[in-house]
Amino acid sequence: MSTAEMVRSKLAGEGSGHDWFHIERVWRNAIKIGRAEKADMFIVQLAALLHDLADDKVVLDEETGLSEINYWLEGEGVPPNVIEPVLEIIQTISFKGGTGKILGSLEAKVVQDADRLDAIGAIGIARAFTYAGSVGQPIFDPQYEVREKMTKEDYRNGKTSSIHHFYEKLLKLKDLMNTETAIQMAEERHQFMEQFLEQFFKEYTVDEE
Ligand code: ADP
Ligand code: NI
């Protein structure tokens, strides 16, 4: 079984926006960015495919996820000098309220950019509301404030709405892209989110005559 098939069967039916189709889009974007940036494509592809398998929404805890990934790669005969950077990438790329570590390798930058591209634009909008549906969070609650600084716990459990999530995370991602290729790909997606928010508030603010 290929790594792609293993990931697909593991994430089938995942309902919070980390399903196989997310992985497939990240994989494709990572290939596009990685080629343009001349990254090691074996590492990039494995990390893109496996990047969500240590997420606390998908497995019990990160530790368990990582050792399962390690076990899988060893079983596939992947050499240690590939396994090590792949595991490192998986541990470092997640946003988690903006508390993420600084990335060292080009391959980590590529995979993080690919993952972040999938959180913005039309697809990002769709994912934000899918996530909200899965945890029972409102579309928009004007009583909440936009949080500037968040711990990982706040990010996961704090009071927020999907529209707030745009200001807490999604609109920031364009300027957090690492590679020139992703910076360019993010531009159109960012503009589309701004347009969406403008229209949302236009419809939300009803003129009374
Ligand atoms: P990652 O771990 O890759 O940084 P998350 O697991 O935090 O991403 O989020 C998965 C998807 O759900 C992303 O598209 C993200 O923008 C969205 N999301 C996360 N938290 C919220 C939230 N509170 N409201 C709406 N969407 C969210
Ligand atoms: Ni992801």
Image (cartoon, rainbow, N blue to C red):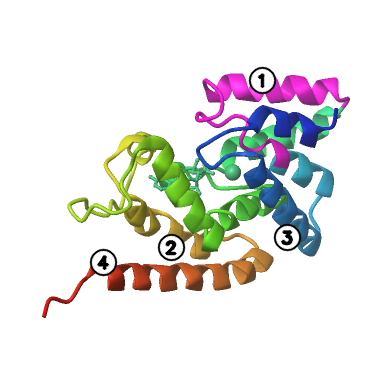
| Residue located 72% across and 36% down the image | 86
Split into quadrants, the picture shows ligand 2 in the one at top right
Q: Amino acid at mark 3?
A: Ile
Q: Earlier in the sequence, mark 2 or mark 3?
A: 3
Residue 19 located within the stretch drawn in magenta: no
Mark 3 element type: helix
Q: Residues within 10 Å of mark 2 (few under 14, many from 20)?
A: some
Q: Earlier in the sequence, mark 1 or mark 2?
A: 1
Q: Quadrant of the N terminus?
A: top right
| Residue marked by disc 3 | 33
Question: What separation in Å lies between label 1 and label 4 (alpha carbons)?
Answer: 47 Å
Q: Residues within 10 Å of mark 3 (few under 14, many from 20)?
A: many
Question: What separation in Å lies between label 3 and label 4 (alpha carbons)?
Answer: 37 Å
1 horizontally vs 60: left or right: right
Tell me, yes or no, whether the two marked residues, 3 and 1, touch with CB atoms within 8 Å. no
Quadrant housing residue 199: bottom left
Start-end of magenta stretch: 49-77
Q: Earlier in the sequence, mark 3 or mark 1?
A: 3
Mark 1 element type: helix
Quadrant housing residue 80: top right
Q: Amino acid at mark 2?
A: Leu
Mark 2 element type: helix
Question: What separation in Å lies between label 1 and label 2 (alpha carbons)?
Answer: 34 Å
Which of pointers 3 and 4 indicates the residue nearer the eye? 4
| Residue marked by disc 2 | 171
| Residue marked by disc 1 | 67
Residue 204 marker:
4
Q: Amino acid at mark 1?
A: Ser
Whether disc 2's CB lies below 8 Å from ligand 1 is answered no
State the image coordinates of residue 182 (x, y, percent, origin top left). Answer: 64, 64
